[in-house]
Image (cartoon, helix red, strand yellow):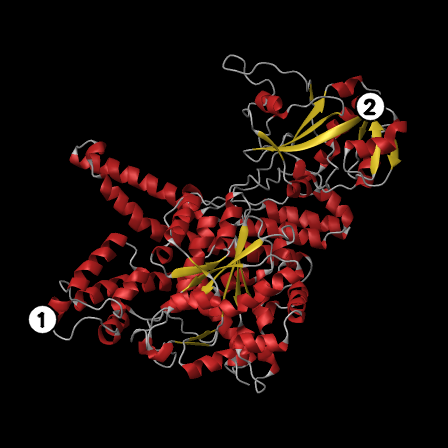
Amino acid sequence: MKSTLFFLAVSIVGKSKPHLLYFRGFRYWIRLLLLFFIPNEEKTKMGVYTKDQLLARLKELQIEFASCTHPAVLTVEAQAKYVGHLGGGISKNLFLKDKKHRYYIISALAATTVDLKVLSQRLGLGKGGLRMAPEEALQEILKVSLGCVTPFATMNESAQSVSLLLDEGFKAQQGCLFHPLSNEMTISLNSRDLDKFLISMGRKPVYVDMEAAPLVGKDQPPDLAFLIPSGVPKVDQPEKDEVSSKIHISEKNTRTETIIHANNKKKSPEKLHSAPIADVRTFVDELIERMSASVLSEIAKETDKEQKELPGSVIDGIKKYLGADFSNLAMSFKNAAYTEGFHSGIQSVLLKTGQNITSYGK
Amino acid sequence: MATPETEQKVEGEQVINPWEVSAKDGGKIDYDKLIEKFGCQRIDQTLVNRIEHLTSRPAHIFLRRGVFFAHRDFKEILDLYEKGEKFYLYTGRGPSSEALHLGHLVPFMFTKYLQDAFKVPLVIQLTDDEKCMWKNLSVEECKRLARENAKDIIACGFDISRTFIFSDFNFIGGAFYENMVRVSKCVTFNKVVGIFGFTNEDHIGKISFPPIQAVPSFPSSFPHLFSDSKDLRCLIPCAIDQDPYFRMTRDVAPRLGYHKPSLIESSFFPALQGETGKMSASDPNSAIYVTDSAKAIKNKINKYAFSGGQDSIENHRKFGANLDVDIPFKYLGFFLDDDAELEHIKTEYGAGRMLTGEVKKRLIDVLSELVERHQRARAAVTEEMVDAFMAVRPLPNMFS
């Protein structure tokens, strides 16, 4: 009861407009402290699932599956030793990322040949666009350990924007074998039931002929380009996306919103690696460029000269002199905004847990 | 108990350790000999070029002018960085007084450049316990000084999303303390006496302090920051007199299964009265303080900056200035960014065509601007900002 009230209160706070420019400090501090204070059942509502919850969910949906536990396995070969009796096709699962920090799970029958170069081209990423995702991403995004990549990992909030590609070959199998968020167990279920599950989690199942290698070129657009994660939640939702934390010159004077979503609603994707960073250097470079452009055009107007005729050294001088000053100012501003967000985050959570402290950490 | 350091004093050698810096016979510090004695490497132009290439920006003035002139294992850090492996920075300050002068800011200005150029996180240690022990100040006073110094450090422009500042009194415990004990077990009493020159009369606080400065070089000391990256390397920008701490650390690290920290070391900032003079807190005219007004800076430079010019204008035009001992020229070497202009001053002043007054005037302009910028930044630092910098919090984008 208390936890539900908590979430209700937090979502109300989040929906109203905080009248300060909150920086990332607010957002991740909320998440961090909430994860600390919230019991496990709320964690689920926040979108971190365990194996047992998954199995319970499958049962709820009346999906039939066979299961078998075994010692932890890290490879398909090791897994094969224990699950032969279940019948059906063992899946091999790859967790990949592209150069723009978008993530993909490729789930295919162990026997299917998966050529990453071909898939990368079919997705429109060029020849070498797909790489194996780093180990940290496994934990951060899929919330699973090594050797445990599975289509079921897409049920986690943090994996909302991970694109899932399923092997067409699954459809032909009686049962397909996957890890249910733990590599100490394997479950076997029909591909139609897998679809049922994915749809219930708000995901559209996509099957791909992994071994096809259509030509990709000027007249033949990449056939899998629609699978690139767009970073926008797949489900329609009225709330805005989580705020971009880049301090943009046009946003400096607007109020930005940080929204904490309550349990049932689909959260906007947690973009761990592609969230725009408040980078002082890029900000200052852009500032100076815009300023130089407008100064040049104004001078050109006044003196009726062409912009090209104006001394470029003037602009270089401005860049050099102001660049350092602007960087310092921007850094000061960034630090101040972060500080405000940080303290509000702390106060917000502490208020909810019934404490009220005026100063922190002396 | 005679120690290697005290023995050297008797023989008239230069003494460089964390608590004393003095040249041989009141002369200049011999850096070549120091490098040889300590066993570190010089930073040469190829290394500077490599840094420029890796970071896609011009090298910091302190690298170009040879202020940061020595290193240990910095090449390894660059090799790994090229391959995509990151590292973190560690530097610190002993908050012994509220008044910071420009020499104190030098390592922090350089560290800020490293943080921006390589896009890596930074931990800053405020050794308030060390000052409490060595300067015999009260615990409360040291804690207060640490916070005040933190404000000046923050004003140097560190990125809060990548920086963790901590004071020993507030932070020691947990994994940090565990590492302290591990390091302490590896260093004998004899060893610290040999390295730091402790005697039987020194209190035990001093003797057990060195591990505290060693331990931030190991990422496992900061589980809230680096729990995912236990293999992370550490780069320590510091003044070369801190080298003994890190020689000890590098000796201990492999025994604990940790990587040795790398170092990049700076030379000493000269006092206003010249290389032979000592910068002391009791003499406000021995240095330019960050709290000085433009007027005070002008006065100090004009009156107290040791000049290498000749005694009369005729002699000066004849012989030129002695650039080796001229303080205004040296200071310009630290703070005048324009290489071409400095070169011009070097030739003109060295030949006697430029007068000391002109050089001093240029220096006053440069320093006034620097100090004013710092004061503005300092004014923007609030107590809440210090709290945020010093809060034990994760830094999710510290490598971005």
Q: Looking at this rendering, what residue extends furthest in the right direction?
A: A85
**SS assignment at label 2:** loop
Q: Amino acid at mark 1?
A: Glu
Dot 2: chain letter: A
Q: Is residue A28 above or below residue A89?
A: below
Please name the residue shown 39% across and 54% down the image: B44
Q: Amino acid at mark 2?
A: Asn
Image quarter hosting the C terminus of chain A: bottom right
Dot 1: chain letter: B
| Along the viewing direction, whichever of B56 and A360 lies nearer the viewer | B56
Q: Position of residue B302 (x, y in %)?
A: 22, 72
Question: What is the spatial separation of the Cα atoms under label 2 and label 1, in whole angstroms?
Answer: 100 Å
Q: Position of residue A80 (x, y in %)?
A: 83, 30
- On the image, which quarter does residue A60 sit in? top right
Residue B314: mark in rendering: 1
Estimate how packed mark 2 is, as few (under 14), some (14 to 19) or many (20 or more) residues with alpha carbons within 10 Å.
many
